[in-house]
Each structure stands twice: as C-alpha cells, then as structure tokens.
C-alpha cells in the first residue's frame, strides 16, 4: 500500500507485514522431520543435563559438600508456541523527492464502436481471404506436381487481394462518401442554402432603381494560397459546377498553376484539382462536351483536360513541335461542335497571334488565324510603328449570331473586328480606350452590341458598325472584367481593383449603377461571371478566393411579355422583347449622333 505522509515533496513507504500460520499436519513429512529433530534435541538436552549434574556432584564432593539435584537450575529451551523468528517491526524506507521521479508515459483514450455487421464483414473478409489462399495453394501444388512429381517442395504463396473485392476502397464506396460529404456540408450550412434558394431582399420594393448583393459562400483551397484567381468559368451543362484557374499576373512572381473545379453542392473542398507547371491564365468548358476543359498558361502552353479522369495530367498539350505561343495565353474559347470537323478552340496571346487548336487523334495541332498588326494613327510615326512588331492580344469574343465575326482587345487599348475568313486585315478598328483592354463581350441577345473594359477605369458600350463608343462608364478604378447577364439584354456587371462590384441596367438607368457594393477588403477583384440558371454571380480576387453573391429582385427584372401556352412561342417572345430593348437603346444613340 502506498501512502503520502506527511503531504509535501517527500513520500514515505510503509510495508504492512502479513504472517501466515505455522501449524502442520502431524502425519506429514515435515512433521516427521520436526519430530525427529525434537527427539534428538531432547536427548542432547538430557545428556547435557546429566553431565552438568555429574560435574556439580564431583565439585561438591571435592569441597566436602552435599548437593541437592532439585536445587540445580538449567536454561529452559525455546517454546515454539510463543517464539517466532520472523521480524514483526515495520521497516520505514527513506524519504524520496518528487523531483527524481520520471514523467509518466503519455496516455491516449481510444474509443470505437463495434456492431454486429462490422464483426460479420470482418469474418467474411477473413473467410474469403482464406478461400483465396487455399485456391492459390491448390493451383501451385497442381502446377508443381506436373513439373516434378518426385520432389515434394513446400510452396509459399502470397495471397493477392483483388481491389474489386475490397468494398471499403471500391468506387461505389467513394461515390457514397461523396454523397454523405455533401449532405453533411449542406446540413452544416443550412441557413446559407436556404438564402440561396428563397432569399429575396424585401427592401427592393421600397427603393426603385437600387439593388443589393447577398454574400453566400467563399470558395478557396489550401493549395491555392498565395495565388491569384486568373479565370472563372461555369460549366454549360451542370449549373452547380464551375472551374477556377489560379496563377499570377506579376511577371516576377511566376510559379506553378492550379485548376480547381468546385460545386455548389459541396462548398468545403474542390471536386477536382489539376496542377500545372506554369500559372493558369484562362480556361473554358466545351459547350457540348462538359467534361472537356481548355486551359491556357503563362508560358504560352495550351492544354485540354478531361475532368472525368482521375489522373492529374491533360489529354492534349501543345508543344514546340506542333505549335505553341511564345507569350502568355490570355483567353481560350471553344467553338460549336461540328460533326464534320474535329473539336477545336481558339486562343489569343501577347505574342500578337490568334490561333485555332484542332484536337486530332494523337496531338493538338495549331493553325494560325490572324496576326494582330499595329494600326497607325495620325499622331504615330509610321517608321517607329513598323519596327515595334505585333500588337499584344489580351482578349477576344465571338459573335453568337455570326460565327465568323469576333472582336479582339489589345494591350495598346485598341479593339479590332476580325473575321475567320479574312486573316490578313481588320474589318473595323475601334478607338476609345487609352490603356490595355482586359475584356470584350458580345451581347447574347443582339448581334450589333458589345462591351469592353480597360485599365483606364472605364467600361464602354459599342455598336460594331460605329468606330466610337456609344456609352462610357467611369468606375474610378481599373476594371478587371465585365460580363452580360444571361437573363436580360441590358444588365451587365463589372469588377474593379478596389474590391467593388458594379451592376448596371441600361433600361433603368443609363448613367449610374443600380448596385455598387464592396465585396472584399484589401484585395483586387479580377473576374466575374453570371450563372446561366440561378440568380448568382461569382467574383474572383487576387488572394485566391471566389465569392458567390445573390442578386436582389431589382437587379434581375425581366421585360413583361404575354404568357403563351406554347413554351417555344413564349421563349421567342422573350428573346424578341430583350432584342427590342437593346435595339431601342442603339437607335436612340443613332438619332443623337
């Protein structure tokens, strides 16, 4: 028993003695030995007594005295009933200091729940493994008997477990875990999901001409730290899936890139992750093949990924042998699928070239489409311009109503209308920007109208038949991206370097935005894109985050049309109403001019 006494740094150890009984059976071997010993001891004591008496008598006779034997006293023997050789005192050990004691070993609590089906699965797995071992041993024994029947060798077979039989690591289990992960995330963020589905800003009913943006989720990844969002693109077939490209716009901070595919059903972690050697600058999903993702990089490489593949490498990559850009690729754009032709997409780069990439069976072939030549103005020196080479391409966009037409924005602030059929010259030149043009966007409802944004703080509205802008909006900071709303022909949004999102509706107000809201602090917004089905937008920043925002009712008003029983007729009425809104806007500016 261990006891601390007195309290303090010293410890005392007390040993409590427990003595057993000394009785033995009289007929046992120990009793016989003890009896013989007692008899011998008694005889020795008697002989010693007789010798002592004899000696005493002799001494008395020599002195002439008489002695009485009864008066003689002798030492009595030990009594076995009242004598014990065992120590009865408690030994007190010396004091010990706590400072010399060792630290106790670490203790870990482990807890697990074992159910009946877990035990059953474990036993069945062990039984199946035993059966496989027996089959392997039988096959090995039969094979050995055929080779050499006279020699009986011991065959040791290492059983190999088929991955298909492993239920825990099977593909079906992975699918189940993904569904469970989505369910857990949706339950944990139930309030945000409810706002995403049902929230409507009630204050819009009392403020005409103003709207707001509701922040929902912020998507980010641990692997994308210290990287900038350089591209954002929704999947055309799955409205909850979108891809984000990570890289850097700073020439001195170039490194590896990353492509992450997120889903609104699981906001905590990307569904797919692809790493690239160079920073990603642009990406685009194929409109008919939603699994194909074209990616452009800072080193001039273009790649095509199949997001269904689990391997982290592209299915097509541009090389110097088949053709490659020499400067960063700033935009890629898939073309509509044609059964008579192979899949292809276009790209634009700072090297002054627009290229068409054709996916053949084994390689990605490059076909030059146009070289962006510098355009002389009245103030430019012709000789100096001719020596400066090609214009650096920044962005481009294809007209949905005329597939051969596309507009190109350059680093010099110029916009050019081009055609696939005329690769040697521009169809039209547009002047209005004084710095690099970051984005150009054709209106999805009208074939004549397109938008542009630039580092000169402006967003401009153009009629492709007029070389000068018909409207200009000064946002007070560098404009990183602009996008048309898919539900209205007069609504567009732009992002600026001060972290603000500006939403305009030209049918409501031609001068001021309906919403000007700061989304992030101490960060620059780089890209924005609308969802084609839900009333949300994605906004990327230079800190690697993508914010999702829901539009209030005032920011997504639709032009009233007559409800038709036929859905096709109703859709045509809707398209005509949106077309008329833009056409009225363009005609008004034509009359002013």
Image (cartoon, grey):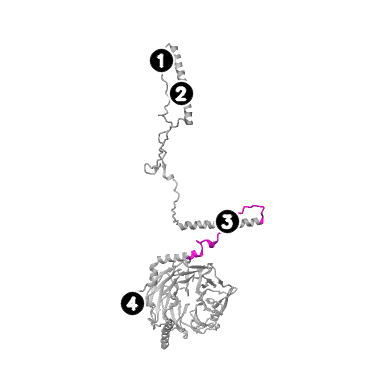
Q: Nearer the viewer, mark 2 or mark 1?
A: 2
Residue 373, image x, y percentages: 54, 81
Instruction: Identify the residue position indicated by label 1 in the image.
Output: 68
Residue 4 occupies which quadrant of the picture?
top left
Q: Main secondary structure of the magenta part?
A: loop
Question: Residue at (40%, 66%) from the top-left corner?
Answer: 189
Of label 1 and label 4, which has the lower sequence position?
A: 1
Q: Is residue 150 magenta?
A: yes
Give the label, 1 or 4, closer to the camera.
1
Residue at the far left: name it.
206
Q: Which residue is mark 2?
A: 42
Q: Nearer the viewer, residue 29 or 493?
A: 29
Residues 392 and 45: in front is 45
Q: CA distance from mark 2 to mark 1?
A: 23 Å
**Which mark sits nearer the N-terminus, 3 or 1?**
1
Q: Residues within 10 Å of mark 3 (few under 14, many from 20)?
A: some
Q: Report if residue 229 is visible in the image.
A: yes
Alpha-carbon distance for marks 1 and 4?
140 Å
Mark closer to the chain start, 2 or 1:
2
Whether pointer 1 and pointer 4 mark residues with C-beta atoms closer than 8 Å, the reply is: no
Q: Where does the magenta region start and end?
A: 147-175
The 10 Å Cα crowd at callout 2, few under 14, some 14 to 19, many 20 or more, is: few
Q: Quadrant of residue 185?
A: bottom left
Look at the numbered disc 4 and give the secondary structure of its residue: helix
Query: Residue 205, which numbered label?
Result: 4
Which of the two discs, 3 and 1, sits closer to the camera? Answer: 3
Location of residue 214 in the rendering, given as x and y in whole percent from the top left corner: 38, 72
Q: Secondary structure at mark 3?
A: helix
Asked if residue 63 is among those painted magenta in the image, a careful observer would answer no
| SS at mark 2 in the image | helix
CB of mark 2 within 8 Å of CB of mark 1? no
Within-10-Å neighbours for mark 1: few <14, some 14–19, many 20+: few
């Amino acid at each position: 028993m261990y006891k601390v006494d007195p309290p303090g740094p010293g410890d005392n150890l007390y040993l409590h003695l427990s003595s057993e009984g000394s009785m033995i059976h009289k007929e046992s071997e120990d009793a016989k030995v003890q009896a013989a010993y007692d008899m011998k001891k008694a005889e020795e004591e008697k002989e010693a007594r007789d010798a002592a008496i004899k000696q005493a008598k002799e001494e008395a006779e020599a002195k002439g005295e008489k002695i009485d034997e009864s008066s003689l006293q002798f030492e009595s023997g030990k009594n076995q009933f009242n004598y014990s050789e065992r120590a009865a005192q408690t030994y007190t050990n010396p004091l010990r200091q706590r400072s010399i004691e060792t630290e106790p070993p670490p203790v870990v609590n482990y807890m697990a729940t074992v159910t009946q089906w877990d035990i059953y699965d474990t036993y069945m797995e062990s039984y199946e493994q035993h059966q496989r071992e027996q089959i392997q041993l039988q096959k090995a024994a039969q094979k050995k008997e055929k080779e050499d029947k006279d020699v009986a060798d011991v065959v040791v077979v290492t059983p190999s477990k088929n991955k298909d039989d492993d239920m825990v690591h099977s593909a079906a289990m992975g699918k189940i875990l993904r569904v469970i992960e989505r369910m857990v995330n949706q339950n944990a963020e139930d309030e945000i999901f409810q706002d995403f589905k049902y929230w409507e800003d009630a204050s819009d009913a009392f403020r005409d001409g103003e709207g707001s943006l509701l922040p929902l989720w912020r998507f980010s990844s641990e692997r994308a730290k210290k990287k900038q969002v350089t591209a954002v693109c929704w999947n055309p077939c799955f409205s909850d899936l979108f891809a984000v490209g990570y890289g850097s716009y700073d020439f001195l901070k170039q490194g590896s890139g990353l492509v992450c595919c997120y889903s609104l059903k699981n906001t905590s972690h990307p569904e797919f992750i692809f790493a690239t050697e160079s920073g990603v600058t642009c990406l685009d999903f194929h409109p008919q093949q939603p699994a194909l993702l074209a990616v452009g990089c800072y080193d001039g490489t273009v790649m095509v990924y199949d997001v269904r593949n689990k391997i982290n490498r592209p299915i097509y990559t541009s090389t110097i042998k088949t053709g490659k850009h020499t400067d960063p690729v700033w935009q890629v754009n898939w073309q509509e699928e044609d059964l008579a032709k192979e899949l292809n997409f276009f790209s634009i780069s700072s090297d002054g070239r627009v290229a068409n990439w054709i996916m053949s069976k084994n390689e990605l072939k490059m076909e030059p489409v146009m070289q962006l030549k510098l355009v002389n103005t009245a103030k430019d020196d012709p000789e100096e311009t001719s020596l400066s080479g090609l214009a650096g391409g920044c962005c481009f966009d294809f007209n949905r109503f005329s597939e051969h037409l596309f507009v190109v924005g350059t680093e010099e602030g110029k916009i050019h209308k081009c055609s696939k059929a005329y690769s040697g010259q521009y169809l039209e030149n547009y002047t209005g920007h004084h710095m690099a043009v970051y984005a150009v966007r054709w209106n999805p409802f009208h074939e004549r109208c397109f938008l542009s944004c630039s580092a000169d703080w402006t967003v401009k509205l153009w009629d492709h038949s007029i070389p000068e802008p018909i409207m200009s909006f000064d946002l007070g900071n560098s404009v990183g991206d602009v996008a048309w709303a898919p539900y209205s022909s007069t609504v567009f949004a732009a992002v600026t370097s001060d972290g603000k999102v500006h939403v305009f509706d030209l049918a409501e107000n031609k001068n001021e935005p309906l919403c000007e809201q700061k989304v992030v602090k101490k960060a620059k917004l780089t890209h924005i894109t609308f969802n084609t089905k839900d009333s949300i937008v994605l906004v990327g920043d230079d800190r690697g985050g993508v914010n999702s925002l829901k539009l209030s009712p005032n920011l997504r008003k639709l032009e009233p049309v007559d409800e038709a029983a036929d859905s096709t007729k109703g859709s045509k009425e809707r398209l005509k109403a949106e077309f008329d809104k833009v056409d009225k806007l363009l005609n008004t500016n034509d009359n002013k001019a």
